[in-house]
Image (tube, grey):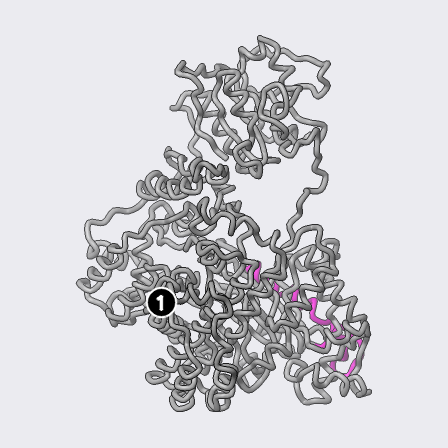
Amino acid sequence: MHNDVIKVTNEKIVKPQGKIYIVYFSSTSNNTHRFIQKLEVKNSRIPYDIKEEILVDQEYVLITPTYSGGGEFKSGAVPKQVINFLNKKQNRDLCRGIMASGNTNFGNTFAMAGPILSKKLNVPLLYQFELLGTKNDVETIKNILVDFWIKPENKKISTLSGNFESDEYITLNAKTKLFDWDKDNFKLDFAAAKSYLKNHIIPNSKKFNSTKERIEYLVKNKYYDEKIINKYSIAKIENLTNQAYSYNHYFPTFVSALKFFNAYALKSFDGKEYLENYEDRVIMNALFFGDGKISKAKKILNEIMLGRFQPATPTFLNAGKKQRGEYVSCYLLRIEDNMESIARGISTSLQLSKSGGGVALCLTNLRECGAPIKNIANQATGVIPVMKILEDSFSYANQLGQRQGAGAVYLNAHHPDIMSFLDTKRENADEKIRIKSLSLGIVIPNITFELAKDNKDMALFSPYDIKKVYKKSMTDISVTQEYYKMLNNPKIKKTFISARKLFQTIAELHFESGYPYLLFDDTVNNRNAHPGRIVMSNLCSEIIQVSTASKYNNDLSFKHIGQDISCNLGSVNIAKMMESGSEFSQSIEEAIYALDHVSRNSNLSTAPSIKEGNKNNHALGLGAMNLHGFLATNHIFYNSKEAVDFTNIFFYTMAYHAFKASNKLAEHFGSFVEFKNSKFADGSYFDKYTQCDKEKWKPATKKIKELFDKYQIEIPTQNDWKKLVTKIKTIGIANSHLMAVAPTGSISYLSACTPSLQPIVSPVEVRKEGKLGRVYVPAYKINVDNLPYYLSGAYEIGPNPIIDIAAAAQQHVDQAISLTLFMTDKTTTRDLNKAYIKAFKQGCSSIYYVRVRQEVLENSENYQCDACVI
């Protein structure tokens, strides 16, 4: 937390002379001592034993921890050893500045030893920072000491731009964490965003005199794709630009501005200049989506500028750029039990990673360790060697050094390698099998839960034998339906483990690593509207679609191209959608159109099976974010029946308009290929809306009914659904899948809203961002009035309300919801298992990630009620 130098009186601050020198106090934990050594400056330590005394003979800066328990010089905040040291006049007179550590959870008493000593000694408070300090704190303190000690002309440059510039925005952002009921410090974050633009962005942005000059320069220098630009006249682009700037967009939070300019804005090839503002990036998205039709471009621009619809990162980042990755968020590949399929899976993963997408692969069909090869027993090495190759491949494809490729692998719970698969994520796993960066997912059939409930052993079936007996791969049968047939079939080799032991191991690993993801096999397949089986999910566990096997020749060319999966994602902002009122339906229509356009304009030639799946299905994944933000700003607690009621009705309404939009697209593009064989064609998928009690899908609480009335959002009636289903049966829908709720990590920070459907973790979240280190993220539109609805974060609320929310939405989402569970270190494996069972029983499709907050760091020390020792 970088504070400007504070002048405590009107007198001139006496700057120190000579070599940089600090004096510090450290408790017996030696945490401060180890931190000080990293500063690499001359230093002296104040003795722990109060009977020992030291006298300094040169000017110094004092660094002290803060103790809890009071705000006075003589007791509480300032350690008694520091008080004893300063009781010597010579030590007091030579002190030139103060730095202090503390705990930001103490609000306005954070690092209180600093201001107390600053006032007492009449010296400036140079810096306050939290707990053990970070690498960023080390660098910041070094720079402050140089700045404080040495003449300006000798200062080192250490800023985001590499030039001398004010870092006022860091101070303003940090102060948002210091909450005071009498001061709305959250507003300082907006000031931080303005300061960031003023002091860093504007001075480092390239200036253009006109839209024409800007477009011509960016096309000529190969920043913008002339194929997109040339579909419009300059006059039309100027008109669209005027529209974009008419919204007077501003970044409501520092992190939203930081995220945009760090991750999305176009920069010069040498990285020294910013070439786009937010409006310019939205314009390029609108031009891409408009595909030469300026009226459509204007409609999409309106949705994005109003914050109602946000394309996923790959689309928003790459739209209109000459040098770009693909618009698609992620991909799913199934691997068959032959070397050609394995080789193809690895090479395709490399190709897809190169263009920026995350890749998930299904390994269920690979024969287990010890299975025969060419009828010779005990030859197969199982899934782990393939996982190791994939992990190395994703690490190698690091996207020009920007980030490592991202990959995940899924395995059925009844695969014989399941326990060794899980062991790869153990903290103490042997390096030969340890998987560090590859994500793991497990496909869990209903029978697994039933066997665990009855405390029975579960059979693990050989995929090699299943293929011989069923003439199908293991993924293409229902383990639940065929379990007892396979159990009694002597031709299928099986081994046994305790079903409860499997769930115990899963829970243990969730504590250690957050993995594995869980996909509930029968839940998703029983709900599946399409022929074939869902066999896996993606990196964030929200995509669930049918895939089919490919067959290869010996030279790895295709004998038969199957269908694999791509994810065309985007999200609506729930709060902004509710504010859209009568335009709700139009907003969903534009969002569905935009995602459909991505599906029809992505180059997937490097992955023929994915290209085939996308061509046949044009599957989309429209999600939502800012649920907690909307609830809190409307004074609804996240863990309330009103929150569940709202989620249910919102997604019910959203689903209706999504299907309506896809039906409209079908009038132009026709239906997806397998429409006639889907449950959409006969209308049976929609029975839950058309064949139920007319009152079923209406608000159950007075508060939510009043909210929808207030925002003038019409809730579809059963008659509305019946009319729509009649049109769908006649015309079809353009997209095989329409909705999927992704985690929305980056785009929720960009949009300054709460992520996905999950609750916030804290009213002011602490994040680490690149060179800046620690930054602070206030919740959506937080103020003193709505603060009580934000005070209980995800860890305080616990998993049950989050599951209730996800289950309510899942009723209307045709794919899945990226469901993250939050636990404290007081949680047991039994508690985790209860959460899995609750999610499973309530119809959730998957569990994405489990986050466990450690309340007390190992080896930390509580010294005299000291919660703040660095």
- Tell me if 730 is positioned left or right of 128 in this view: left
**As drawn, 467 above or below 168:** below
Q: Residue furthest left?
A: 235
Front in this rendered view, residue 856 or 379: 856
Tell me where residue 657 appears, x and y as whole percent.
40, 75
Where disc 1 sits, the SS reads: loop
Question: Which quadrant: the C terminus?
Answer: top right
Amino acid at the residue labelled 1: Gln
Q: Looking at the image, can residue 112 be seen?
A: yes
Q: Which residue is mark 1?
A: 712
Counting other residues with Cα less than 10 Å from the Cα at mark 1, is it few (<14), some (14-19), or many (20 or more)? Answer: some
**Residue 851 percent across, percent down from the top left:** 62, 55
Q: Quadrant of residue 60?
A: top right
Q: Is residue 344 above or below residue 575?
A: below
Q: Is residue 852 left or right of residue 555?
A: right
Could you tell me if residue 553 is visible in this image?
A: no
Please determine whether, in this image, residue 586 is positioned above or below residue 667. Answer: above
Q: Residue 61 lies in magenta, yes or no?
A: no
Residue range highlighted in magenta: 367-396
Where residue 152 sits: x, y (%)?
39, 23
Q: Residue at 48% x, 86% y: name it.
A: 680
